[in-house]
Image: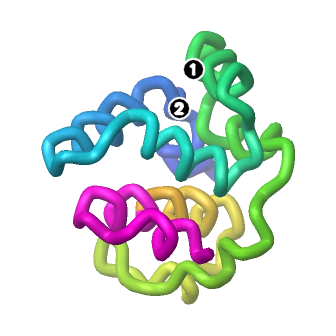
Amino acid sequence: MKKHKIYTMPFASVYPHYVNKVERKGRTKAELDEVIQWLTGYRSEELEAQLEKQTDMESFFSEAPTMNPSRSLIKGVICGVRVEDIEEPLMREIRYMDKLVDELAKGKAMEKVLRS
């Protein structure tokens, strides 16, 4: 079976779009990094290394130190699909990240975005 195109896309090519999205809405790159680190367990220097290596999305998630167990609390619609209904594990992880970025950009309080 052919892999979905997004799986082979470098995380570094998606990341600037996330940065632009949150900065346009008055949030910061630091807040974005905090959200990504919360989800994946990467530390700042590890996240930077993933960006520099041009790691693809599949490897970015498979190499993540510790996926946050609270990510299952992420609910809602992204790209017209309910994230909690996505059966393919990697696509669900990618959409969790998309949903967190959307919530951050929409001005949701950081405690709520991070499911604190």
Amino acid of disc 1: Leu
Kindly identify which residue carries mark 1. 51
Span highlighted in magenta in the image: 99-116
Residue nearer the viewer, 4 or 40: 40
Q: Toward which corner of the image does residue 46 lie, by quadrant?
A: top right
Q: Toward which corner of the image does residue 54 lie, by quadrant?
A: top right
| SS for dot 1 | helix
Q: Position of residue 34 (x, y in %)?
A: 55, 45
Dominant SS type (magenta): helix
Amino acid of disc 2: Phe
Residue nearer the viewer, 43 or 17: 43
Is residue 57 a member of the stretch shown in magenta? no
Q: CA distance from mark 2 to mark 1?
A: 7 Å
Classed neighbour count for the residue bearing mark 2: other residues with Cα under 10 Å, few (<14), some (14–19), many (≥20) = many
Q: Position of residue 23 (x, y in %)?
A: 22, 39
Q: Position of residue 18 (x, y in %)?
A: 34, 41
Which image quarter holds the C terminus?
bottom right
Q: Position of residue 110 (x, y in %)?
A: 45, 63
In the rendered view, tell whether residue 15 sits above or below residue 52: below
Is residue 102 a member of the stretch shown in magenta? yes
Q: Residue at x 25, y 64 (%)?
A: 107
On residue 11, the disc is: 2
Residue nearer the viewer, 8 or 35: 35
Q: Residue at x 85, y 43 (%)?
A: 65
